[in-house]
Image (cartoon, grey):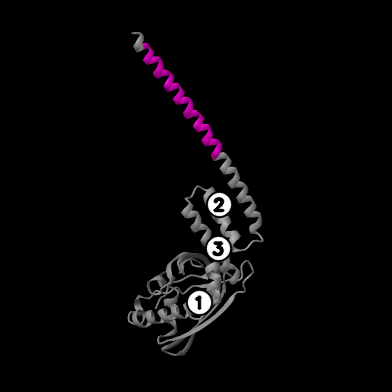
């Protein structure tokens, strides 16, 4: 019995000692983590202060430190730092925070169809994604409001446009707003012959994001507008002209962003 009692006492002492060691390790680990977090926080603060005047490497180090502070793995932190360096370099090359002047884009195209048919097809904005390559969707909550979604490089962009003036068979003028670049402009329709219509597109592009700024310098938006006009012409010549009775254009009138008359195509 005395032997068993001694074993029990010994086991109890061992378990108590083990628990004490675990508590000590836990406190030590928490202290080390707190010390590490404090150092990391000071590092991030110093880098943040220097990033205002620092170069790409400083901004990359800041991004990496923030990634570590957010609990990301060292590999992801390195990737964050590398991408920050690339963006900082590109921003320095393409203007950084400097205000970029808007780009004026003027394109025209002749379409072998009557002006009314061409205009009516243009007013069917929700059809644009079916034949334009970069337009993903167009939602029209009201006759003067349009919500657009399009692909810009590898990203998607959304914006809202407001039609401020629309005269049937003549022209449509709009203004837009978006967090990363927007396009104001007008499109007009000119009868060259009874079966020939000239579409004149005038755009004023205001870039804001990094991709938009770089694309602005490369005049990518002008090329895209030209290609989309060609897609529109192909659609009119192959679809609308073959089935004109299916094109239900909007024949209403808008002035000062207000609908003056609202009517559907009655032809």
Instruction: Tell me the magenta residue range.
Output: 5-32
Q: Residue at x 56, y 59 (%)?
A: 60
Q: Which residue is mark 3?
A: 85
Depth check, front residue: 191 or 151: 151
Please state the horizontal and vertical placement of residue 193, each as a whole percent of the image. Answer: 44, 91
What's the CA distance linking mark 3 and mark 2?
14 Å
Q: Is residue 16 magenta?
A: yes
> What distance separates the C-alpha of mark 1 from that of mark 3?
24 Å
Q: Earlier in the sequence, mark 3 or mark 2?
A: 2
> What residue sits 63% from the left and 50% below the top?
45
How many numbered marks, from 0 up? Answer: 3
**How far, Cα to Cα, is label 1 from label 2?**
34 Å
User: Image quadrant for the C terminus?
Assistant: bottom left
Relative to 194, 214 lies left or right = right
Position in image of residue 104 (x %, y %) = 57, 79
* Disc 1 versus disc 2: nearer the observer: 2
Disc 1 versus disc 3: nearer the observer = 3
Residue named by callout 2? 66
Regarding mark 3 in the picture, which secondary structure is present there? Answer: helix
Secondary structure mainly formed by the magenta segment: helix
Helix, strand, or loop for circle 1?
A: helix
Q: Residues within 10 Å of mark 1 (few under 14, many from 20)?
A: some
């Amino acid at each position: 019995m005395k032997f068993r009692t001694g074993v029990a006492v010994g086991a109890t002492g061992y378990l108590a000692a083990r628990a004490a060691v675990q508590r000590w390790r836990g406190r030590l680990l928490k202290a080390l983590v707190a010390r590490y977090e404090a150092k990391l926080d000071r590092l991030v603060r110093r880098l943040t202060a220097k990033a205002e005047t620092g170069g790409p490497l400083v901004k990359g180090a800041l991004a990496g430190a923030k990634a570590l502070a957010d609990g990301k793995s060292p590999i992801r932190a390195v990737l964050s730092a590398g991408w920050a360096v690339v963006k900082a370099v590109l921003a320095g090359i393409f203007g950084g925070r400097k205000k970029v002047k808007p780009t004026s884009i003027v394109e025209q195209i002749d379409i072998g169809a009557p002006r009314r048919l061409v205009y009516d097809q243009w007013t069917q904005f929700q059809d644009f994604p079916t034949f334009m390559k970069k337009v993903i969707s167009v939602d029209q909550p009201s006759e003067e409001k349009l919500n657009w979604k399009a692909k810009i490089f590898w990203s998607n962009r959304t914006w809202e446009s407001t039609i401020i003036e629309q005269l049937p068979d003549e022209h449509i003028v709009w203004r837009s707003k978006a967090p990363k670049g927007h396009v104001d402009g007008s499109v007009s329709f000119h009868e060259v012959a009874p079966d020939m219509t000239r579409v004149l597109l005038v755009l004023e592009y205001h870039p804001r994001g990094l991709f938009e700024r770089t694309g602005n310098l490369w005049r990518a938006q002008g090329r895209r507008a030209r290609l989309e006009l060609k897609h529109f012409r192909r659609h009119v010549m192959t679809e609308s002209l073959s089935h004109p009775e299916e094109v239900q254009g909007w024949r209403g009138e808008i002035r000062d962003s207000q609908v003056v008359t609202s009517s559907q195509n009655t032809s």
